[in-house]
Image (tube, rainbow, N blue to C red):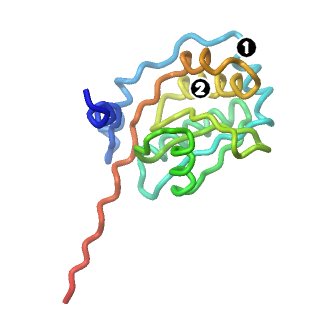
């Protein structure tokens, strides 16, 4: 399988709520959590910030934003958006192919150069909570190889790219 075919199989651009729900229904939901998940997420909320990319009219972006806001309410983590240009740079820095919005990262409040991706596309809140937990563990010293294997896989449910507008000359 070529890299392009593998990437196409892992990316699911959506333009309507029905197709987004259909793709999300195929994503497994985390059911088992470490016993210290709640305590860890609450304790680390002042140390880290969640940053996500977004785009106008991006349905998966709005969905991810609402799920992250649920987690913000439950655990106290700050959330902010980053520009599309910043998102592209970050993805490139981490060696991730750019597949579209949304992408979410966790980084220390005081260190914008250290970041861990927690979502490429929207996802279920339990999967996001697990990835938040693992990113906090990695940023505080747990071996990345262990934590990355335990992360929920990225869904790739992203907004469909905007179609270029055509201007007619007269």
Mark 2 — residue?
131
- From this viewpoint, is residue 86 visible? yes
Residue at (33, 35) in percent of width and height = 7
Badge 1, how many Cα within 10 Å: few under 14, some, many 20+?
few
For the residues carrying marks 2 and 1, which lies nearer the camera in this image? 2
Counting from the top left corner in percent of width and height, residue 161 is at 34, 53
Counting from the top left corner in percent of width and height, residue 95 is at 51, 39
Q: How many marks?
A: 2
Residues at badges 2 and 1 in contact (C-beta under 8 Å)?
A: no
Q: Is residue 56 left or right of residue 104?
A: left
Residue 36, disc? 1
Question: Which one is in front, 166 or 59?
Answer: 166
Residue 4, disc? none
Corner quadrant of residue 167: bottom left
Corner quadrant of residue 4: top left
Residue at (34, 23) in percent of width and height = 26
Q: Is residue 162 left or right of residue 123?
A: left
Image quadrant in which the N terminus is located:
top left
Image quadrant in which the C terminus is located:
bottom left
Residue at (30, 30) in percent of width and height = 6
């Amino acid at each position: 399988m070529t890299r392009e075919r593998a990437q196409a199989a892992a990316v699911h651009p959506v333009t309507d709520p029905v197709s987004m729900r259909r793709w999300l229904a195929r994503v497994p939901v985390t059911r088992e959590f470490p016993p210290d998940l709640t305590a860890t997420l609450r304790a680390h909320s002042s140390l880290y910030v969640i940053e996500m990319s977004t785009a106008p009219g991006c349905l998966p972006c709005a969905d991810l934003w609402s799920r992250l806001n649920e987690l913000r309410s439950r655990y106290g983590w700050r959330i902010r958006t980053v520009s599309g240009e910043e998102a592209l740079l970050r993805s490139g820095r981490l060696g991730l192919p750019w597949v579209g919005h949304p992408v979410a990262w966790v980084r220390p409040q005081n260190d914008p150069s250290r970041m861990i991706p927690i979502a490429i596309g929207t996802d279920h809140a339990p999967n996001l909570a697990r990835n938040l937990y693992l990113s906090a563990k990695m940023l505080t010293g747990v071996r990345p190889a262990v934590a990355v294997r335990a992360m929920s896989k990225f869904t790739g449910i992203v907004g469909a790219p905007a179609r270029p507008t055509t201007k007619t000359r007269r």
